Image (cartoon, rainbow, N blue to C red):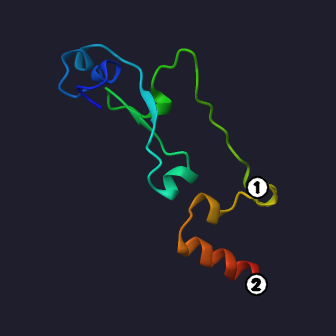
Amino acid sequence: MFEVDDVLEQYHPLHATSMTVHIPPAAGLAVRSFLRLSAQWGTFTIHTRNEALGEAPQEPPILKKYIVPGNAKDSILRQLDSVGIQARTVYPDLSHLGASVKERYS
């Protein structure tokens, strides 16, 4: 969207401002042209500096880090499964569908 959207133009790698002034990362939703992008909400970020998203200054803070204890993972997976969130719904392809069918009937 460079040269089309004035807001995104400031993130253009050849734009002088993006090299001298810190501009916070921006997020955008991808076009839902693939089932996997749609299932995973295909959100992407664009940065002007080489830093991880969690290391960038945030005003207001928008990211949180959660550490899931190893002994809680099985319970969380069962809870997600009970509301229809499974590997085959997050990764809607034949491989994950096949694994789901195999797991269910073995």
Location of the N terminus (image quadrant): top left
Q: Is residue 22 above or below residue 103?
A: above
Residue 21: give x, y in percent of width and height.
29, 13
Q: In the rendered view, does 8 fall on the left or right side of 44?
A: left
Position of residue 83 measured from the top left corner of the image (x, y, whole percent): 79, 55
Q: CA distance from mark 2 to mark 1?
A: 19 Å
Residue name at image x 31 percent, y 23 percent = 5
Which numbered circle lies on residue 80? Answer: 1
Q: Residues within 10 Å of mark 2 (few under 14, many from 20)?
A: few
Give me the disc on residue 105.
2
Q: Tell me what residue is drawn at x 53 percent, y 15 percent.
A: 59
In-image side of 4 versus 96 (left or right): left
- Quarter of the picture holding the C terminus: bottom right
Q: How many marks?
A: 2
Question: Image quadrant of residue 88?
Answer: bottom right
Residue 90 — which label? Answer: none
Q: Residues within 10 Å of mark 1 (few under 14, many from 20)?
A: few
Query: Helix or strand or loop: what does disc 2 sit on?
Result: loop
**Which of the two labelled residues, at mark 2 and mark 1, occupies the earlier sequence position?**
1
Could you tell me residue 51's position as x and y percent? 38, 31
Inspect the image, locate mark 1, and give the three-letter code of the amino acid beneath it. Leu
- Residue closest to the eye, 28 or 20: 28
Residue that appears at 71% across and 57% down: 85
The amino acid on which the numbered mark 2 sits, given as a three-letter code, is: Tyr
Question: Can you say whether 64 is above or below 16 in the image?
Answer: below
Residue 8 position in % (x across, y down): 33, 24
Circle 1 — which element?
A: helix
